[in-house]
Each structure stands twice: as structure tokens, then as C-alpha cells.
Image (cartoon, rainbow, N blue to C red):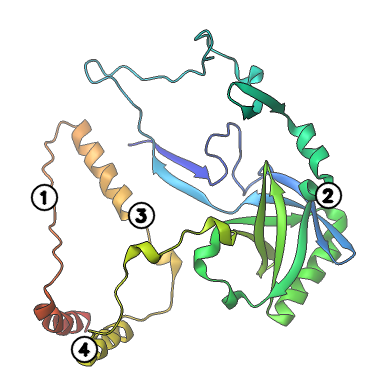
Amino acid sequence: MPKEKTKSSEDKGEKGQKRATGGARAIWSGAIAFGLINIPVKLFSATQEHELAFHQLRKSDMSRIKYLRVAANDGQEVPYEDIVKGYEIEEGVHVVIDEEDLQKAAPKKTQTIEIVSFADEDEIDSIYFEKPYFTAPDKNAVRAYVLLREALKETKKVAIAKFVLRTKENLAILKPEGDALILNQIRFQSELREREHLNLPGAEDMKKQELDLAVSLVNQLTDKFKPEEFTDTFTDELKQIIEQKAKGIDITAELAKLEAPADTDLLETLRASLEKAK
């Protein structure tokens, strides 16, 4: 059976990081600043990735490829505990920064999820959303945690907050989800790219009959979103191919050719799509 690797979104490149459920290790500890109230909380990864773990091999003898951390000056391998972070202030000249320096830079920021305002969630475009985290209160902060959670539910608002994780300040929203407060990290405006260069088409040449059929098709296929019904079928199929190849079975894949219909066929294609949906 192919080996499947399960990672949380914070696990990449970090050894020893545990999953966010079942006795997980927190990736951040601090407090939510709600007015004059401080709510001590811990952050846990809310997502995990399922992917097949492939090794890189030398083609001639299937020998594993290994990567070593080596120093540029002498080519010697460097133990992980001897590696530090440095910021290059000029070519070849670095200033070393450690965790204590980060704490000194802004103690409040590195220990606080600071609520700066509240807003309606539908005001925030989905392009801003980046990464979700679970928050869990310390045992002496349960009442304050519940108070904030229920206030957000009552007002149907989300909290806009800032927090520092590792070496970067992040923007986020705090949203109640059941008994949890979810911290959704979102992007700053400056992190979004402009779209003018995409040369996107307008709607001038769109035909009303085509639009009516397209709307009908959308309505025909509209259903309540049930996330449990969606699975990673590509990974499952890839596992089957791996198992067959391991047994010496020849695999011949036929690639499906997807061709965009010509404009003259669009109306007929929409009609056919509607019939298929029925």
C-alpha cells in the first residue's frame, strides 16, 4: 500500500510538530486582547494535508537522494543546532537574529492577538483568506473566551485582529464556529497582485440566450454544500496505479483531451449540459 503522508499546514519543514487534534502541541501561545480584557489562548493548526510521499531516486540504481545542510565557505555539513538566522545588511555581512531579539522588538505584538475592529464577514473577499487556526483558552480564561465567542454570535460579526507568528505580522479574523473561535489568517492588501495585466474580457459580446441557459444550468446543479461528500479521488487513483505497477501490471493511461467549444457551438453545448444535468 503506498505510504501516505499527513501534514498540518504548519508541519511542512518542522520536525516534531503534532496534529491539532488528540493532544496536539500548540504552535503559538499568547492572549486575545479584547478591549481591556486579555484572554490567554493557544493556537493549533486547523488543517492537514494528505499527500503521497515520494522519494527522489537516482535513476540508474534507485539509490535515495539526500540533501545536506552545508556551509558555503568550506562545504562542511552543519548540524541543525548550529544554524542561526541572519539578515544581510550588505553583501556578505549579516546580523544574527534569535527568538529573544524577536521578543525584544515588540513584546506585546509577539504575545497578543490584538483585536482592532469588528466587521461583517461578507465584507471580506475570499481572495484574502489564507490559513485557519483553532484557538483554545487556558483553563483560567474560559469565561472570557465564551464571552467573546457569544458576543460575536449575537452580533453576527467577526473580529479583525493582528498577530505576530515567527517573524511576520499577520492580519486575521476571529470567527465563532460551534464552541470554537477560529482564527483565519488573511492577506494584507499589499500581498495581492494587480489583475490589469490579465486582459480579462468584458460582457459586451455575451448573448442573452446563452446567459439564460447558463443561469438555468447553474440553478439546475445548485445543491447544499456538503464537504464530507468530496474526496481526493486523484490520490486514490494514483495509489491504484502504484499498487498495480508494484505487482508488475503494465499501466496504459489514455489522456482525455479537453477542447474548448467554438463560439458557434456554445449554445448547443449549454443545451446538452442542461439535458445531462436533468
- Disc 2 vs disc 3: which is toward the camera? 2
Query: Which residue is labeled 2 in the image?
Result: 108
Mark number displayed over residue 207 = 4
Query: Which residue is labeled 1 in the image?
Result: 254
| Residue type marked 4 | Lys
Residue that extends furthest to the right in the rendered view of this protein: 36
Residue at 36 percent of width and 81 percent of height: 222
Q: Which type of secondary structure does the marked residue at label 3 adopt?
A: loop
Q: Who comes first in sequence, dot 2 or dot 4?
A: 2
Looking at the image, do the residues carrying marks 2 and 1 touch, with CB atoms under 8 Å apart? Answer: no
Whole-percent x, y for residue 78 in the image? 57, 14
* Residue 133 seen by the camera: yes
Left or right: 269 in relation to 113: left
Compute the Cα span from label 1 to label 3.
20 Å
Residue 139 lies, with reference to residue 210, above or below; the image says: above
Residue at 36 percent of width and 20 percent of height: 65
Looking at the image, do the residues carrying marks 1 and 3 touch, with CB atoms under 8 Å apart? Answer: no
